[in-house]
Amino acid sequence: MPELPDLVHLVKVLRPALAGRRVEAARLRNPLVLRLLLPGDFTSLLSGRRFETLERHGPFLRFGLGDLDLVCHLMLAGRLRLAPRAEKPLAFTAFALDLDSGQTLSYGDEKSMGKIYLGEAGRFESIPGYLSQGVDVTGPDFSYELFTALIAKKRCQARVFVMDQSLLSAIGNAYADEILFEAGIHPKAPCGSLPEDKRRALYEAVKTVLAWGTEEVEKAGRPLEEKVRGHLRVRNRAGQPCPRCGATIRKAGVLGFDAFFCPICQPDRAGRGLDWTRLEGKKE
Ligand SMILES: [Zn+2]
């Protein structure tokens, strides 16, 4: 579920709420999601610990509890919730931590695809993908110069480039579609041959679309575990009119993932002979 704007929002809400809070009891309900990187067991390792820090690293959330790190990679269906202890448990709860504030931090995952790593602080080498994240696209290091250098080396489709976490950390399916729509770039356009104006547009769109998404998630003010997607303009909108030009939004497969786009606003410049305005759009 969570994409970058959701994670930025999660950190903003959870960081002050968890700072200094002590774990009174820890419960593990679905060991499938847990990767224990040190001897001991989940419950006794976490009981009595205090939350000190919370940082986002690409798609990872790193909760610092003294000399332990609890690192969450929520993947497709992972959800975090902070709620009063008396509330009924989150669906598909994988673990729950009762805090001295009377609240419970729980993690639910109906697909059991997410990964929760508990290990010594700062030891990330056992966490797949952690150390290979590219530049944080929400941070100050994400400059146009760096972006140009990254894209110049690539020959892949634009959507594949945007979603490559070892280059840009970290854009998921929904915002990849929104970014390409904003930039007016076809998802299958070869990224290495984009003209200068389109490269600039893509760079700007990464920043503006993620900032807009974060604002929309905040504005919606929904509980942390809920998906906020109503503001998206093309994602999962095949068959609906484009909000910009009215043409019918299409869906296409890009390396096994569904991509949603407007065939007029995002023309296929590579000219592979496909007229996307005439193809039948599949409704979701
Ligand atoms: Zn359009």
Image: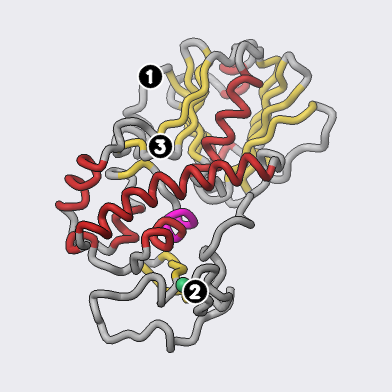
Identity of the residue drawn at 36% across and 41% down: 169
Alpha carbon of mark 1 to alpha carbon of mark 2: how far?
A: 49 Å
What amino acid is at disc 2? Cys
Report x, y in % for residue 72. 51, 34
Binning the other alpha carbons within 10 Å of mark 3 as few (below 14), some (14 to 19) or many (20 upward) gives some
Identity of the residue drawn at 22% across and 40% down: 146
Magenta residues, start to end:
173-177
Q: Where is 75 relative to 94, above or below?
A: below
What amino acid is at disc 1? Gly
Report x, y in % for residue 179. 41, 56
Binning the other alpha carbons within 10 Å of mark 1 as few (below 14), some (14 to 19) or many (20 upward) gives few
Q: Main secondary structure of the magenta part?
A: helix
Q: Where is 201 relative to 145, above or below?
A: below
- Mark 1 highlights which residue? 122
- Mark 3 highlights which residue? 138
Respond yes or no on whether mark 2 lies under 8 Å from ligand 1. Answer: yes
Mark toward the start of the polypeptide (2 vs 3): 3
Please give left or right for residue 58 compared with residue 153 in the image: right
Report x, y in % for residue 262. 45, 72
Number of labelled discs? 3
Q: Nearer the viewer, mark 1 or mark 3?
A: 3
**Element type at mark 1:** loop
What amino acid is at disc 3? Thr
**Element type at mark 2:** loop
- Mark 2 highlights which residue? 245
